[in-house]
């Protein structure tokens, strides 16, 4: 699949992140990421990206500590995002002549498993699978993402996570901001899981 565009948006009604990936051939993969899966995936995805960037950069083979590898990945991410186009709206069909085909069907894949496989001197492979109770055959697909697309996907997911506010009170995207007033903070706020 030659990826044309990526999209990740938080859907408040579903309380999920809808990821859409369309190809230059006119096919589109749609998948739902739930809160639980996304919050568990987020640190693993970031670590895999850091390790993959360190492996790809031939001059970084001497880097052993995580802080140096993360700094290299952050530097590469900033360089890639500077040239990335986040302003062009997601197109349902890259070619107006051919309609979008949905190889997985019209219902987005409800992701229950993600496998991340780095390829030496190659792309990062990410497999998204759906295996639901009572479902004989699961659905799934795999994408291969070159570094610019990996960093773009991470950026889009980070934005969707911020919109979702799922990370409030967790350490996923960093600690929550400190209160700005002397008002007491409610210690017994209700907690919800989906």
Image: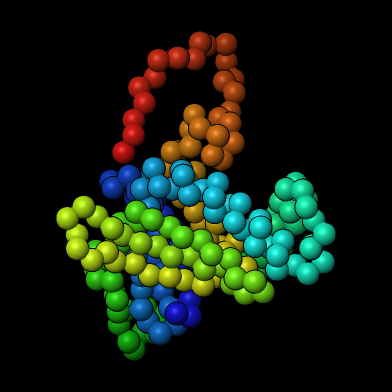
Total numbered labels placed on residues in the image: 0
The answer to whether residue 80 is seen in the rendering is yes
* On-image quarter of the C terminus: top left
Q: Position of residue 11 (x, y in %)?
A: 34, 50
The residue that appears at 39% across and 42% down in the rendered structure is 36
Question: Along the horizontal axis of the image, is 153 left or right of 79?
Answer: left
Q: Tell me the colour scheme of the image.
A: rainbow
Question: Along the horizontal axis of the image, is 135 left or right of 112?
Answer: left
In the image, residue 3 sits, relative to residue 8, either above or below, namely below
In the image, residue 69 sits, relative to residue 168, either above or below, namely below
Q: Position of residue 38 (x, y in %)?
A: 44, 48
The answer to whether residue 82 is seen in the rendering is no
The residue that appears at 75% across and 57% down in the rendered structure is 72
The residue that appears at 45% across and 14% down in the rendered structure is 187
Q: Quadrant of residue 173?
A: top right
Question: Along the horizontal axis of the image, is 4 left or right of 175?
Answer: left
* On-image quarter of the N terminus: bottom left
Task: Name the outermost residue toward the bottom.
Answer: 97
Q: Quadrant of residue 175?
A: top right
Q: Position of residue 70 (x, y in %)?
A: 71, 51
In the image, residue 175 sits, relative to residue 19, either above or below, namely above
In the image, residue 21 sits, relative to residue 46, either above or below, namely below
Q: Position of residue 136 (x, y in %)?
A: 19, 63
Task: Name the outermost residue toward the left.
Answer: 134
The residue that appears at 36% across and 73% down in the rendered structure is 28
């Amino acid at each position: 699949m030659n990826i044309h565009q990526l999209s990740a948006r938080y859907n408040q009604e579903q309380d999920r992140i809808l990821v859409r990936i369309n190809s230059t051939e006119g096919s589109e993969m749609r998948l739902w990421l739930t809160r639980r899966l996304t919050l568990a995936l987020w640190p693993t995805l970031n670590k895999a990206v850091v390790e993959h960037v360190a492996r790809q950069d031939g001059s970084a083979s001497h880097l052993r500590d995580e802080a140096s590898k993360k700094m290299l990945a952050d530097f590469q991410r900033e360089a890639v995002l500077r040239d990335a186009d986040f302003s062009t709206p997601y197109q349902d069909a890259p070619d107006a002549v051919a309609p979008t085909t949905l190889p997985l069907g019209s219902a987005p894949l409800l992701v229950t498993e993600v496998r991340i496989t780095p390829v030496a001197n190659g792309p990062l492979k990410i497999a998204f699978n759906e295996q639901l109770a009572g479902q004989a055959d699961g659905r799934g697909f795999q994408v291969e993402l070159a570094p610019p697309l990996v960093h773009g996907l991470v950026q889009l997911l980070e934005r969707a996570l911020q919109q979702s506010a799922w990370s409030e009170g967790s350490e996923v995207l960093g600690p929550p901001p400190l209160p700005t007033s002397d008002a007491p903070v409610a210690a017994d706020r209700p907690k919800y899981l989906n």
